[in-house]
Image (cartoon, grey):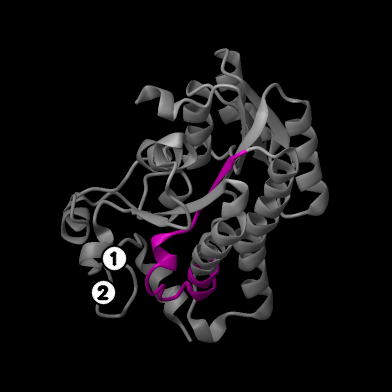
Amino acid sequence: MTDLLSLDGRIVVVSGAGGGGIGTTVTRLAAEAGATVIAVSRSKDNLDTHVAPLADRGLPVIPVTADASTDDGIETVLDAARTAHGTLYGLVNIAGGAAPGTWMPATRVSRSDWRDLFTANLETMFFMSQAVAAEIRAAGDPGSIVSVSSISGMNSAPFHIAYGTAKAAIVAATRTLAVELAPHDIRVNAVAPGVTETAASATYVDADPDRDQRAIAMGRRGTPEEQAGAILFLLSDLSGYVTGQTLLVDGGLNLRWTHLGADNTSLFLKDQNFREAISRI
């Protein structure tokens, strides 16, 4: 069983590795499973803070400063993979997300807002997947691509329509890539996290155990380790007959889906002023 989780001799690219949350945790788990990890972030400071300590521990992690939303950034990543020890096998697309200022009614979303969120989330995922898949296919090797969608892409996303739609598009792209790449022994899957305790989510989600108990079947928010564990499963040979799937990792939040208040804003939003601001037409 442990052999099926092993990534020995394989190179795995983690796009969005430097934030200290899910991406950094995936980087650590993949390296502990034996992979040489190309840890990618736009921010060198973030890599120095969160990823460099993993390399200092002796884990096979190579920090790479690159913008995965650009062709030049993707080429920088591929260059690092080509010179690393091992065979290019895996890609984890975590780069993306959305700043608190992107929350607003659909009637206020501008073309610029829409395009920025699609670039950060969908385009980054697709063009990085395209490039890594082409590299793996050219070598004639098997591979596994895992992308991060969101529970917002699996349901409605009130006051966050651009983000939710971009994350839903990742699910659709995952399914189509899976069909096209299956004959080349490259699997393509995704995870859709629910509310997870990360530095990014802390900007708009507060600690409220009573609310979590009401909203989430398991009664608590998830951890980066729990998201990373699901990603490692889909990345590894343990899921060797799984492709085109999006795994909800949400503690049962989707089963209850009662986290919207009477005004249709999320109960997870901690600041009443923020709630009022995003709901203004």
SS state under label 1: loop
Check disc 1 and report the residue beneath it.
267
Labels 2 and 1 touching (C-beta < 8 A): yes
Q: Earlier in the sequence, mark 2 or mark 1?
A: 2
Residue 22 position, x and y percent, is 47, 41
Left or right? Give the position of 173 relative to 245. Answer: right
Rendered residue at 60%/22% (across/down): 9
Task: Confirm whether residue 147 shows in the render.
Answer: no
For the question of whether residue 126 can be seen, the reply is yes
Looking at this view, is 177 or 31 the one in front? 177
Amino acid marked by disc 1 = Leu
- Residue 122 percent coordinates (x, y): 61, 62
- Residue kind at label 2, given as amino acid type: Gly
Label 1: few (<14), some (14–19) or many (≥20) C-alpha neighbours in 10 Å: some
* Residue at image coords 47%, 36%: 236
Q: Is residue 124 left or right of residue 218?
A: right
Above or below, 33 against 75 in this view is above
Magenta segment: does it hold 145?
A: yes
Instruction: Indicate left or right for 104 with 11 as reference.
Output: left
* Viewport quadrant of the N terminus: top left
- Is residue 203 positioned above or below 46 on the image? below
- View extreme (front): residue: 183
Local SS, label 2: loop
Left or right position of 73 against 47: right
The numbered mark at residue 261 is: 2
In the image, residue 184 sits, relative to residue 235, either above or below, namely: below
Question: Which percent across, then down, holds residue 106?
Answer: 50, 82
Q: CA distance from mark 2 to mark 1?
A: 6 Å
Residue drawn at x 29%, y 48% as measured from the top left: 221
Instruction: Count how many numbered circles sit on residues in the image.
Output: 2
How far across and down, in percent of the image, does residue 107 sit? 52, 87
**Numbered range of the magenta stretch:** 142-166
